[in-house]
Amino acid sequence: MTDIAVLARIVDDAARHAVPIDQLSHSEALSVNQAYDIQYASIDRRLGRGESIIGLKMGFTSREKAEQMGVHELIYGWLTDRMLVDNGDTISLDRFIHPRAEPELAVRMARSLSGSPSWEEAWDAVECVAPAIEIIDSRYQNFRFSLADVVADNSSSSALVLGQWRDKPDDPRDLPIELSFDADVVASGSTANVMGNPAIAIATGAEMLARRQRLLEPGWIVMTGGATAAQALRPGLQVEAGVETIGNVSFQTASG
Ligand code: OOG
Ligand code: MG
């Protein structure tokens, strides 16, 4: 029998201590629904340690990301206050297993959103936008996972860096976005890569949460998903992302 609490502890401990684990799917036949049960239970463990939810991240919203990881279903995971890194900060890579960075458009919700909103309704519920870098870190060995594995592992959520909040543009559909390491562009794309429109990623998040009687809440941040393939981090890097017309965000990785 699948013991949700035991599996939640395994993924939570792996994240907390940055020690990689074998894929859960190697020893358990997990449904996606059970994987979300594990994800929710692992987040409850974080909340029990005093962390609080600050929003939601969407995953595999772009073909670039889906192809890089071989998972073609949309997923989500939770963001907590402990995952926030200040814009411009230097972070040690010791707290991660094999971190990767991806440039994203982040939004902050003005109002709650639930049911199955249109993209216009989703965009209307957004208060403001920011350029963002998500640092993902799969807890599985070699960054390999099945759909159920990655969902159980809070969709690889690990850290996020947000630039300055700005007024939202009228239309979020085609904003060039790029990621650079030490001033060299290592990945570039457009918000159009994100489901053709990142507002659809927000609407889809609301719809997926509604299946579990949850909603996107006012004040929450939504990470709309990597617009490009993720890039492996290494010590001593200056990492910067830019979203055209919205701005830039950066951090450094500590050397060695
Ligand atoms: C899963 C998380 C995907 C995105 O932006 O598509 C994601 C992973 O790639 O490990 O964050
Ligand atoms: Mg992401």
Image (spheres, rainbow, N blue to C red):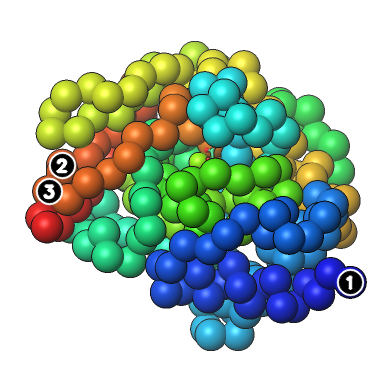
Task: Check contact, mark 1 vs mark 2: CB within 8 A.
Answer: no
**Dot 3, crowdedness within 10 Å: few (<14), some or many (≥20)?**
some
The percent coordinates of residue 30 (x first, y second) are 81, 55
Closer to the N terminus: mark 1 or mark 3? 1
Taking the image as shown, residue 99 lies to the left or right of residue 170, namely left
CA gap, disc 2 and disc 3? 7 Å
Q: Amino acid at mark 2?
A: Gln
The percent coordinates of residue 53 (x first, y second) are 58, 67
Taking the image as shown, residue 115 lies to the left or right of residue 248, namely right
Q: Which quarter of the figure is the C terminus placed in?
A: bottom left
Closer to the N terminus: mark 1 or mark 2? 1
Q: Which residue is mark 1?
A: 1
Residue 236 numbered mark, or none: 3
- Element type at mark 1: loop
**Dot 1, crowdedness within 10 Å: few (<14), some or many (≥20)?**
few
CA gap, disc 1 and disc 3? 45 Å
CA gap, disc 1 and disc 2? 47 Å
